[in-house]
Image: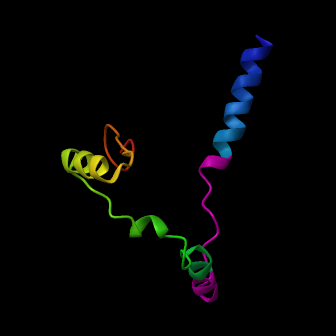
Amino acid sequence: MIRIEGAVVALVLVGAGAGTAAEPIAPDQVERLANLIKPRAGEEKWQRIPWLTNLWEARKQAAADGKPILLWEMDGHPLGCV
C-alpha cells in the first residue's frame, strides 16, 4: 500500500509541473537566440552530398564507382508519431 501511495504522490508532483508554461521570450532576446540555434557554415555538409532517391540508380552508380550504398529507410510518418 505504501508503494502505491508513493507512486500516486510522485505522479501528482510530476503532473503538477507539467501544466506550467515556460516564460515567454523577451523581444530583445529573439535575435540572440535565433543566432544561437541557427546552423553555422559547415554544419550542413550533408546537404552537399548528391543523395539519390532511386535505389536501382543508386545501386548502379555505387557498382560503377566501387562504393557502398547507405540506405536510410524508415517506416511511418517522417515526423514521427503524429
**Residue 4 placement, left or right of 66:** right
The front one of 12 and 27 is 27
| Magenta span contains residue 54 | no
Q: Dividing the picture into quarters, in which one does residue 29 lie?
A: bottom right
Point out residue 43 in the picture as x, y percentages from the top left corner: 54, 71
| Magenta span contains residue 29 | yes
Point out residue 58 in the picture as x, y percentages from the top left corner: 26, 50
Determine whether 7 is above or below 15 in the image. above
Determine whether 64 is above or below 34 in the image. above
Determine whether 80 is above or below 37 in the image. above
What residue is rendered at 40% in x and 70% in y? 48
**Residue 73 placement, left or right of 15:** left
- Magenta stretch? 17-32
What residue is rendered at 20% in x and 50% in y? 57
Determine whether 31 is above or below 52 in the image. below
What residue is rendered at 27% in x and 51% in y? 64
What residue is rendered at 72% in x and 16% in y? 4
Point out residue 73 in the picture as x, y percentages from the top left corner: 34, 41
Point out residue 34 in the picture as x, y percentages from the top left corner: 56, 80
